[in-house]
Amino acid sequence: MRLFTFLSLLFCSFPVFAQEPSKSELSPCGTLPEIGDWLRAYKERPEDFVLSRSSDTLNVGIQIHLLAKDNGTGRFTAERLLNAFCRLNTDFAGANVRFYFKNDWNLINNTAWHTHTEIETGIEMMLTNNVADALNCYFVADPAGNCGYNLPYAGVAMSHGCSGPNDHTWSHEVGHALSLPHTFIGWEGKVYNFQNPTPDTLTYDYTHFHDTIDTQIPAPLDTALVEYLDGSNCAIAADLICDTKPDYLSYRWDCDGQGKSLVQQKDPTGATFYSDGTLFMSYAADNCQNRFSDEQIATLRANLLMEKADWLTNEPPRGDITETAELLSPLGGQFSPSIGTVLKWSSVPNATRYLVQASRFAIFSLKEVDMVTADTTFTIGQLPNNLTYYWRVRPFNDWFACTEWSAAGTFKTADITSVSAPDVEGWRCYPTLLVPSQPITVEIPENWLNQKTQCAVYDATGQMMWKTDLTFSTEANEISLPSAPWSTGAYRLVFINEKRVKTKSFLIIH
């Protein structure tokens, strides 16, 4: 069983992330300015890079690492990861790049890595845990005070607070991993001032952010040319990409209705402009960003094909999921055992995993069950008695997470025996507290399989209420009782075949 089952347990899912740094408390990105050797070579002589599969969808394997504290608390939840993964693939759809979960989600309990203040700690985390031939992505509470950062030789670190369903930080950091610099490269850590003359060059320090880890500390300063508005130096200035216009804003900024910065800037010649906030590699607010430029797309695809080919697969993607799960039982507030409630739902085409949640609140603000399973049933451990619970299911697979929750079902817990240990003969019958027409599940020993069996229900006076003939072909069987009115009270379920008789009891309530 894959590690998706790591959540297959009962727990109170309190919003521990609320105590973690919020997006407003973190810097947009900790990736320092760097024009890698590969990018320089590609931009100087792109004709030397003969690329096959130039229009194919490139399928990229991601290795997910979910960090928690030493005691296992504070981990990024499955629901939040699926939402972030959906956003990542949506953002890269225009580049014809698709990501998939290559391996099990890796669960790591380490407080020092979960909240680290230094990039050096992140380097240790990645080099200790990286998986070969995949883009390694680490979700932590605080990656050195940033929303995220990318180490070219190691992987991407992401903060929980910047990984929401409408956040583009993960796409920004993956853009870095695929060789793309900031649109404002060289301005990192500097504050642009319109009142001062704009320089022709900027120096920057990229310690720890070379293409390889064997870097001098501190690194020698590098120099970036400042890009002119007329594009005359665009191929050698800033990010070396000509269809991303000048941008000197190295802080999180908002945009107008056309996606342009509210702050006017001027290039070294005095020509004025506003930055383009639609680009993922800028620091514009998330509501502004929606694209990579055409040249950025060509560059990141070339980097995948030439430098990161071991991240790619020819495996055909699993199909998209277009249906929601149908909840089967328990439904309609029916009584269910406080120990051993069995949740059942329909299988969904193309789904290989299901996220299942149960909560005492209709908005699922706190969750008693928050788990992932490959099955279409889940047996809950112990719940408090006499409470109404809401539950729902969300399907997904390694390739596709843009899925919807089922409609919520409800049940009420009662102090009844449900999925207790089988009796000495191997029989088990549950639930034992039913509402009219509710099905009952019977688990039988092997020696009753494939034999014609009469099943009958008798009330407390011995009157037969219902009878049918069955042949059990599996050890677990759901018997649908008739919808005719039943009086509140105790009943006996009697099974008879040629050699044996077995009796089980249950209660009907209203």
Image (tube, grey):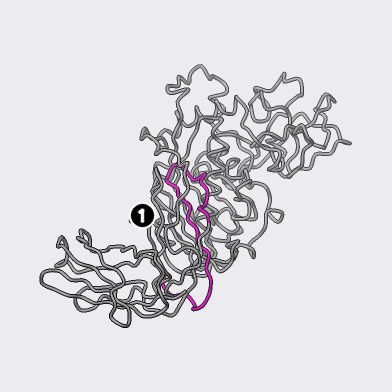
Asked if the magenta segment contains residue 402, the reply would be yes
First to last magenta residue range: 381-407
Q: Nearer the viewer, residue 48 or 322?
A: 322
Magenta span: chief secondary structure: loop
Residue 359 % position (x, y): 54, 66
Farthest residue to the top: give it.
47
SS at badge 1: loop
Q: Does the magenta stretch include residue 207?
A: no
Residue to which mark 1 is pinned: 2
Amino acid found under the numbered disc labelled 1:
Arg
- Which residue is depicted at the point 20% across and 75% down? 502
Q: Position of residue 416 (x, y in %)?
A: 40, 79
Quadrant of residue 199 within the rendered picture = top right
Q: Where is residue 33 in the image (x, y as percent from the top left)?
A: 64, 39
Identity of the residue furthest to the bottom in this view? 461
Residue at x 72%, y 38% (from the top left corner): 187
- Indicate left or right for 48 with 373 as reference: right
418, 71: nearer the viewer: 418
Q: Quadrant of the N terminus?
A: bottom left
Q: How crowded is mark 1: few (under 14 residues within 10 Å), some or many (20 or more)?
A: few
Q: Which residue lies furthest to the right in this view?
A: 195
Residue 184 coordinates in the image, percent (x, y): 70, 35
The residue at the point 76 percent across, 28 percent down is 200
Task: Report the front residue among 417 and 157.
Answer: 417
In which quarter of the view is residue 2 placed? bottom left
| Relative vertical location of residue 331 with respect to residue 294 in this rendering, above or below | below
Please indicate whether residue 430 sits to the left or right of residue 288 in the image: left
User: In the figure, residue 454 lies in which quadrant?
Assistant: bottom left
Nearest to the observer: residue 231 or residue 73:
73
